[in-house]
Image: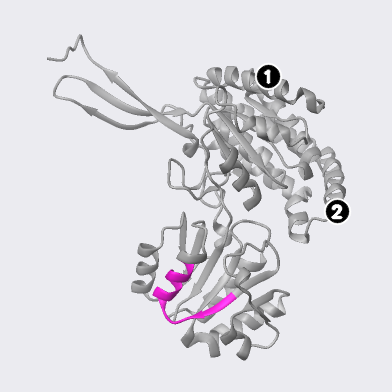
C-alpha cells in the first residue's frame, strides 16, 4: 500500500497502464475475452475460502464503523453469494461480444458505404461502496466491452475486493490479455478518488455506484464525464384496479427481499379506494414482516402500528426495513408524487387497468418503469445482461442497467472506391 504522499504518482501510473491496456483490448479477440472471464470465474470459485476469510475482515471493519444491518448485508459474502459472482462472470462470458457490432449500415448515392459500429469507450473508472461483488461485475463488463477499468472500491470491502480482483487478473493472465486491463486502487485513501475524478488524459468515463453522498461528490468534483447512478427512491403505486394477491406478493417482495439494494421499494402509494381493504391488509403484512411504516395522517388514523411520517420521509432512500406510505386520489396524483420525490430510478404500478398502466408508463420518465412486478428486478442480471455496472439515471448515453453494450460508443466506417465529392 502506498503512502498518501505517493497518491498522485500512484494514480498517474495506474491511469497510464490502463490507457495502454485499453489500446490492446479494443481489438482483442472475442474468444480471448470470453476465456479470460471463464478463467476468472474458475479462480473465484477455487479461492472461495480465501475470499470468505477476507470478507470476515471487512465485516469486522464494517461493525467498527457502525454500518447498518442493511449495509452489512450488502457487504457480506458467503458460499451462495460467491456462487452468484461466479454465475455472473460466466453469464457475461457467454454473451455476444458487443465490440464491432454493426448497428446500422447504408449506401449513399455518392457510392459511399457507411457503417455505424460499436467501439469501446476506452478507460472506465468505477467508484463504489460496500458491495464487493461490484468488483467482479464491473471488471467483467468492462473487459467484455473492450474497456480497461480502474476500480476504486469502498473502504469497507477492501479485503474482499482485493481477493476478487486477484482472480480477475488470473483470468487475464491465463489468456495473454494485458493484466492492467483490470486494476484495483490499492489504498483506502480518499485522495485516490479525487485524483481519479480529474484524470482527463487517461480516463474516459466515471461510474459512481453508491449512496447520495458519493454520487454527489463525483458529480461536483469530476472533470471526467460521469454516468450518474443516483439513489433508488423507488415507488410502488397500488392502483384502484390492483389485484389483491399480486399487490401483496409484489409489495412484500419489493420491500423485504433485500432492503439494501437500489431496487428496494422505499415508498408505497395507495389509491384512496383501497385503503380500507387491500391497502390496509398490505400495510399490516409489512408491519408483521418487521417493516416500519412511516405513514401519512390518513393511514396513521386507520392502521395501527404505523409511525407518523415527516417531510424527510418523502424522497428518502432507507435501504432498510422502513417504507413511507401515503394515500393518493388517482393515478395522476401518484405520478405527481413520484415526479416530486422520485429519483428517476425505478417505479412500479400495480393494476389490471391497461389505461392506468399506459398513463403511468407514458407520463413518468424513470429509467425503469414496471407493472405488476417487483422492483427488485431492477437489475442488469435480471434483464439478461449477466451483470450490471450500475443503474444509470441520467439521460445521456447509458440509461437504466448498464451492461456491456452500454459501455460502448460507436464509430462510422466509410468505404468508397476512389470516390470524390463534387
Disc 2/disc 1 C-alpha distance (Å)? 33 Å
Residue 271: x %, y % from top left: 47, 81
In the image: residue 83, left or right of residue 141: right
In the image: residue 22, left or right of residue 46: left
Residue 239: x %, y % from top left: 45, 77
Q: In the picture, which quadrant includes the C terminus?
A: top left
Residue nearest the viewer, comparing 404 with 197: 197
Q: Is residue 107 above or below residue 337?
A: above
Q: Which residue is mark 2?
A: 63
Is 329 magenta? The answer is: yes
Is 14 magenta? The answer is: no
Residue at (54% x, 56% y) in the render: 378
Q: In the picture, which quadrant includes the N terminus?
A: top right
Residue 103: x %, y % from top left: 35, 34
Residue at (63% x, 86% y) in the render: 300
Residue placed furthest toward the left:
422
- Using a 10 Å C-alpha cutoff, classify the residue at mark 1 as few (fewer than 14 neighbours), some (14 to 19) or many (20 or more): few
Residue 410 visible somewhere in the drawing: yes
Q: Is residue 390 above or below residue 236?
A: above
Secondary structure beneath disc 2? helix
Magenta segment, which residues?
A: 325-338
In the image: residue 101, left or right of residue 161: left
Residue 285: x %, y % from top left: 66, 80
- The disc label shown at residue 215, or none: none
Secondary structure beneath disc 1? helix
Dot 2 or dot 1: first in sequence order is: 1
Q: Is residue 300 above or below residue 117?
A: below
- The disc label shown at residue 13, or none: 1
- Using a 10 Å C-alpha cutoff, classify the residue at mark 2 as few (fewer than 14 neighbours), some (14 to 19) or many (20 or more): some
Tally the marks.
2
Residue at (78% x, 59% y) in the render: 68
In the image: residue 236, left or right of residue 61: left
Amino acid at each position: 500500500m502506498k503512502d498518501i504522499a505517493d497518491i498522485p504518482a500512484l494514480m498517474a501510473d495506474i491511469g497510464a497502464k490502463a490507457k495502454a491496456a485499453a489500446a490492446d483490448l479494443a481489438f482483442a479477440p472475442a474468444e480471448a475475452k470470453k476465456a479470460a472471464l471463464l478463467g476468472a470465474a474458475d479462480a473465484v470459485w477455487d479461492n472461495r475460502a480465501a475470499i470468505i476469510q477476507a470478507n470476515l475482515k471487512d465485516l469486522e471493519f464494517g461493525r467498527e464503523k457502525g454500518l447498518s444491518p442493511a449495509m452489512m448485508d450488502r457487504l457480506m459474502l458467503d458460499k451462495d453469494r460467491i456462487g452468484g459472482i461466479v454465475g455472473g462472470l460466466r453469464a457475461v462470458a457467454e454473451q455476444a461480444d458487443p465490440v464491432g457490432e454493426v448497428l446500422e449500415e447504408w449506401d449513399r448515392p455518392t457510392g459511399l458505404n457507411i457503417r455505424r459500429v460499436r467501439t469501446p469507450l476506452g478507460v472506465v473508472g468505477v467508484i463504489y461502496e460496500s458491495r464487493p461483488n461490484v468488483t467482479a461485475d464491473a471488471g467483467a463488463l468492462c473487459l467484455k466491452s473492450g474497456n480497461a477499468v480502474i476500480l476504486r472500491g469502498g473502504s469497507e470491502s477492501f479485503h474482499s475486493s482485493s481477493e476478487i480482483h486477484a482472480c480477475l487478473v488470473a483470468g487475464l493472465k491465463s489468456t495473454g490479455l494485458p493484466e492492467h486491463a483490470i486494476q484495483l486502487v490499492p489504498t483506502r485513501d480518499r485522495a485516490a478518488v479525487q485524483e481519479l475524478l480529474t484524470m482527463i488524459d487517461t480516463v474516459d468515463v466515471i461510474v459512481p455506484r453508491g449512496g447520495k453522498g458519493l454520487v454527489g461528490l463525483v458529480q461536483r468534483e469530476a472533470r471526467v464525464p460521469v454516468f450518474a447512478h443516483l439513489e433508488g427512491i423507488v415507488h410502488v403505486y397500488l392502483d384502484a384496479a390492483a389485484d389483491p394477491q399480486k399487490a401483496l406478493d409484489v409489495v412484500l417482495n419489493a420491500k423485504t427481499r433485500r432492503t439494501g439494494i437500489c431496487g428496494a421499494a422505499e415508498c408505497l402509494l395507495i389509491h384512496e379506494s383501497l385503503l380500507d381493504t387491500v391497502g390496509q391488509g398490505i400495510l399490516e403484512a409489512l408491519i408483521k414482516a418487521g417493516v416500519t411504516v412511516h405513514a401519512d395522517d390518513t393511514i396513521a388514523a386507520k392502521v395501527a402500528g404505523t409511525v407518523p411520517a415527516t417531510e424527510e420521509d418523502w424522497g428518502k432512500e432507507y435501504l432498510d426495513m422502513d417504507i413511507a406510505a401515503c394515500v393518493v386520489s388517482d393515478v395522476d396524483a401518484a405520478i405527481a408524487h413520484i415526479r416530486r420525490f422520485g429519483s428517476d430510478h425505478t417505479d412500479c404500478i400495480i393494476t389490471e387497468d391497461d389505461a392506468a398502466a399506459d398513463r403511468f408508463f407514458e407520463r413518468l420518465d424513470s429509467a425503469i418503469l414496471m407493472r405488476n412486478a417487483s422492483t427488485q428486478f431492477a437489475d442488469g442480471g435480471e434483464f439478461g445482461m449477466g451483470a450490471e455496472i450500475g443503474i444509470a439515471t441520467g439521460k445521456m448515453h447509458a440509461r437504466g442497467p448498464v451492461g456491456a453494450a452500454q459501455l460502448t460508443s460507436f464509430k462510422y466506417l466509410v468505404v468508397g472506391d476512389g470516390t470524390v465529392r463534387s
